[in-house]
Amino acid sequence: MRHARAVARCLFVACFPLMLLTTAVRLEASSVPIYEYGFDKYSISEVTKIDRAQLSAVARRLVDYFNSRTETPQITIVNQNGDEFELFHDYELIHLEDVKGLLQLDCGVQVASLACIIAYVLLFLFWQRGRWQDLARGVRQGCALTLALIAGLGIASLLSFERLFIQFHLISFSNRYWLLDPGKDYLIMLFPEGFWQDVALLCGGAVAAAALLLGGVAWAVPLLYERRKPASSL
């Protein structure tokens, strides 16, 4: 039983970075304003010759596709010359399908890690009644692990984001359809490397902020409880 509790505690701690990171990724992938922010910052309308209203429609289409509200991310666009065309090549559609698969995996990991955290809390309260301070310690450890991982990834990104970005694609995708030509492929025109660096920074910052908040609560509540104990016993 002691070994089972130790394994459960380690799993509980490890689930915190998984839950926080997958939640941040899922929220970003479903946020049309983040896509539009990138379009504005990197002057995508000028690069692609596609007006801002249609770019917003592209963002909504991608979000709908990633959330299984439409079957295809393909969309018909009219450029500044009045020519109508389909935005993505076949290989870009394959890559977007692969990306959707990753996001579905992300969603599965998010649900599983959250379920593990909830299950551990319930089991802990059953095992260790009245020892909720130990549970708070586990939360702090999970948040500390999250901050350590975010710090490590942040340092790696500062040293060479491009290398980290390429390694991510080599690990995540079994084909080379992610190797796109910025001169003719609209997918990479819409989302240049700078956009992904901004998204990674936002994701890391959000995860770190959430870890600090949860860890701070898990630190402050037991401290306040201990300070109030002498007063309540008088």
Image (cartoon, rainbow, N blue to C red):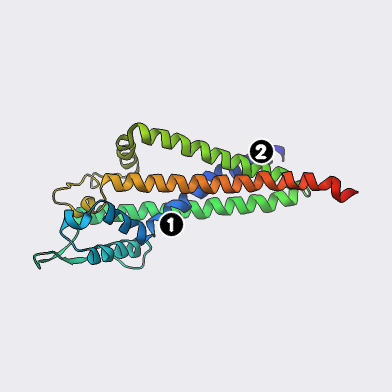
Measure how far apart labels 1 and 2 are at the Cα level.
Answer: 32 Å
Question: What amino acid is found at the position of numbered circle 2 in the picture?
Answer: Ala
Q: Could you tell me residue 57's position as x and y percent?
A: 27, 66
> Residue at (32%, 68%) from the top-left corner?
70
- How far across and how far down the image is residue 16, in percent? 55, 46
6 to the left or right of 160: right
Disc sitting over residue 6 in the figure: 2
Residue count near mark 1 (Cα–Cα under 10 Å), binned few <14, some 14–19, many ≥20: few
Residue at image location 20% in from the left, 53% down from the top: 91
Q: Going by the image, does 127 lie left or right of 185?
A: right
Query: Callout 2: helix, strand or loop?
Result: helix
Q: Nearer the viewer, residue 66 or 133?
A: 133
Residue sitting nearer the eye, 105 or 79: 79
Q: Is residue 151 above or below residue 44?
A: above
Earlier sequence position, callout 1 versus callout 2: 2
Observer-side mark, 1 or 2, equals 1
Going by the numbered disc 1, the residue's amino acid type is: Leu
- Report the residue that reaches farthest toward the top: 159
The residue that disc 1 covers is 27
Instruction: Report the residue at 73% width, 43% height from top.
Output: 223
Residue at far right of view: 234
Q: Which residue is pictured at 63% across the width and 53% down the height?
A: 119
Q: Quadrant of the N terminus?
A: top right
Give the structural element (helix, strand or loop) at label 1: helix
| 17 lies left or right of 79 | right
